Image (cartoon, rainbow, N blue to C red):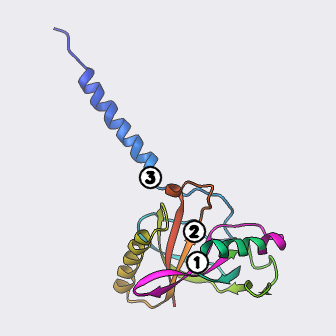
Amino acid sequence: MKKKFFPLFALIAACNLHAEEKAIDAPKYVNEAPLPEKWPEPGPFNKVEKKSYPAYRAAFTNGKGETSSFWRLFSHIKKNDIPMTAPVEMSMSEQDGKLSQAGMAFLYQNGTVGTKGPDGAKVEVRDIKAVQAYSYAWQGNDSKENIAKARTALEETIEAEKVETLGFRLLGYNGPGTPRNKRTWELQAVLK
């Protein structure tokens, strides 16, 4: 009698295919622009980690309009021949228990690039001190739901560790050239 191996082969192939799909779906940082000097890569994904960030220089603008803030800062770096880096930093404010964007910054490669001070009425270049932060990274979009999930995870860690924070910032590592489901974000609670 001849043995049939097809069902067993099909089961093994299906398991291997499922494992390959999981590996493909695992979050992975899509690097579109260089990080500032000594800046850590985003991640790990979907968990809180304490991270250290070096001092840096950045061009800041206030305003809630994400698109207008982005183009204002893009014009600033283009006019001043400043190379684009990632991430873009968004300061966050709290209103009615929810976080929303209060300002935006483009980070420079290092503290020797560009000149500190105002550039017109709406952009200011500042040097920022080194900080530590609790960070929660994810891949996808910056929806209110994803930000709320990251905030909850951060607040649980802050409460468990009994630390004080200076507030939240959102780091966006990808632009419109990366599909929304592949974009990397980090919500951070900056430590005092």
Tags 1 and 2 touching, CB below 8 Å: yes
What label does residue 164 carry, if any?
A: none
Give residue 109's position: percent from left, percent from top: 73, 71
Q: Tell me: 85 left or right of 50.
A: right
Q: What range of the chain is rendered magenta?
A: 76-105
Q: Residue at x 44, y 52 (%)?
A: 26
Q: Residue lying furthest left in this view? A: 1
- Label located before the other in sequence (1 or 2): 1
Q: Tell me: 154 left or right of 35.
A: left
- The residue tagged 2 is 172
**Vertical relation: 57 (above or below) 165:** above
What's under tag 1, amino acid-wise? Met
What's under tag 3, amino acid-wise? Ala
What label does residue 26 carry, if any?
A: 3
Q: Residue at x 66, y 74 (%)?
A: 68
Residue 56 painted magenta: no
Q: CA distance from mark 2 to mark 3?
A: 19 Å
Q: Residue at x 50, y 77 (%)?
A: 188
